[in-house]
Amino acid sequence: MNKFLLFTTLLALGSVLAVSGCSTKPGTTTTTAPPPTTTLPAGEEPVALVSVSGPYPVYVDGKPLWNPGGPVVEITLKNVSAEPVASLTADLGIERAGPPGLSSFVFTFDVTSAAPLLPGSDISVRQTLIGGGFSDNINYLLTINGTLQSGAGFAYTKQVLITAPAQ
């Protein structure tokens, strides 16, 4: 009988330990998923596309230089919402030479929660499209991704023409 008592005690103790490992203890922190990114209907985007332009010349010692790496393109966006934008990227879908699977260029805007893009403000980024090329009469896909100061995410895609820079 002594073995039976020892066996049931160990079984009960093992059950208590197994169940306690599955319960939430007071003071335990839990992580939550980031806010979902929403796909917004046209006209409700918090950030408007101002322009996508290029190629821009590269200057060395004040003289334009041909850039063998690829063209320089500039994307300008504007915050048209009533809320600051805390993060912002744009993915320009242009084919590029090189390893398979690399078919776009990501433009990262200098926007953070500490230095957000304020309502009514615009921001530009220039980037050399290494191995890229484009035509001025073809539409390309531009996907704009971001997060508002409140934490709400957004993402939407537009067709864009890359226009010549203003002289």
Image: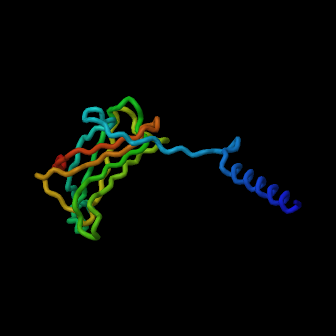
Compared to residue 11, the image places residue 41 above or below, namely above
At 83% across and 59% down in the image, what residue appears?
Answer: 4
At 26% across and 41% down in the image, what residue appears?
Answer: 49
Judging depth in this view, the residue of 36 and 75 nearest the camera is: 36
Q: How many marks overall?
A: 0
For this view, does 15 lie left or right of residue 57?
right
Judging depth in this view, the residue of 41 and 112 nearest the camera is: 41
Residue 39: percent from left, percent from top: 32, 40
Of all residues, the one furthest to the front in this rendering is 1
Residue 64: percent from left, percent from top: 21, 61
For this view, does 84 lie left or right of residue 69?
right
Which image quarter holds the N terminus? bottom right
Residue 9: percent from left, percent from top: 82, 55
At 28% across and 38% down in the image, what residue appears?
Answer: 48
Of all residues, the one furthest to the left in this rendering is 137
- Quadrant of res 120: top left
